[in-house]
Image (cartoon, rainbow, N blue to C red):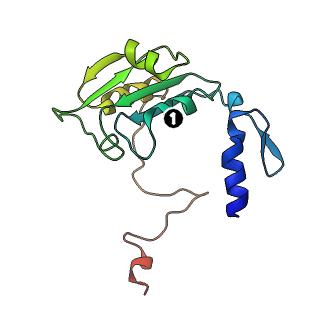
């Protein structure tokens, strides 16, 4: 398994159309044409933002790339109102990440508000939540917290 994984990672099959098959189906990320919200952190030591930017360019749809001004966890856990929060956006996706960053719009506050607006543009009208859980096709399970919490 380790040898197969090493070969797969070294050859980068996801960056080439049809170089990877899953259950007999060739994978071409350019065929993924849904809108994508891609977030990265400037100081992320696990997934460097420039690598995330390159990955976002692999898809065929419209990508909203957002760069948050924190590390791996703080980029995500970044609620509105944090005075230290900053993020960048751009409507363009140039080839070089540095060009994207240089020409991006800088924002104060959390990227969460930007994400909320992005989602709202792609969502339907809000609906009231059902008064009770489940329906005929999918009956509700047991009451919370469920019996599994009592299992040893």
Task: Tell me if 96 is positioned left or right of 147 in this view.
Answer: right
Eyeballing the image, is 80 above or below 90?
below
Asked which quadrant contains residue 115, the reply is top left
Residue beneath disc 1: 51
Q: Position of residue 5 (x, y in %)?
A: 68, 56
Position of the C terminus, as image quadrant, is bottom left
Q: Position of residue 71 (x, y in %)?
A: 33, 42
Query: How many numbered circles does the render carry?
Result: 1
Q: Give neighbour class at mark 1: few <14, some 14-19, many 20+ (Cα, 10 Å).
A: few
Identify the element where label 1 is drawn: helix
The foreground one among 132 and 7 is: 7
Q: Residue at x 45, y 71 (%)?
A: 142
Q: Residue at x 32, y 30 (%)?
A: 111
Asked which quadrant contains residue 118, the reply is top left
Eyeballing the image, is 15 above or below 88?
below
Q: Residue at x 46, y 42 (%)?
A: 47
């Amino acid at each position: 398994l380790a040898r197969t994984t090493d070969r797969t990672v070294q050859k980068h099959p996801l960056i080439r159309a049809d170089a990877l098959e899953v259950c007999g189906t060739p994978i071409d990320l350019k065929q993924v044409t849904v809108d994508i919200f891609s977030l990265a952190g400037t100081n992320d030591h696990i997934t460097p933002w420039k690598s995330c930017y390159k990955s976002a360019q692999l898809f065929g749809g419209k990508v909203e790339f957002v760069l948050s001004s924190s590390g791996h966890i703080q980029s995500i856990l970044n609620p509105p109102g944090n005075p230290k929060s900053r993020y960048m956006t751009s409507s363009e996706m140039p080839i070089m990440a540095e060009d994207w960053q240089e020409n991006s719009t800088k924002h104060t506050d959390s990227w969460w508000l930007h994400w909320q607006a992005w989602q709202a543009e792609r969502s339907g009208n809000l609906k009231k939540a059902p008064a009770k859980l489940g329906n005929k096709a999918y009956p509700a399970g047991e009451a919370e917290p469920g019996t599994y919490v009592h299992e040893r």
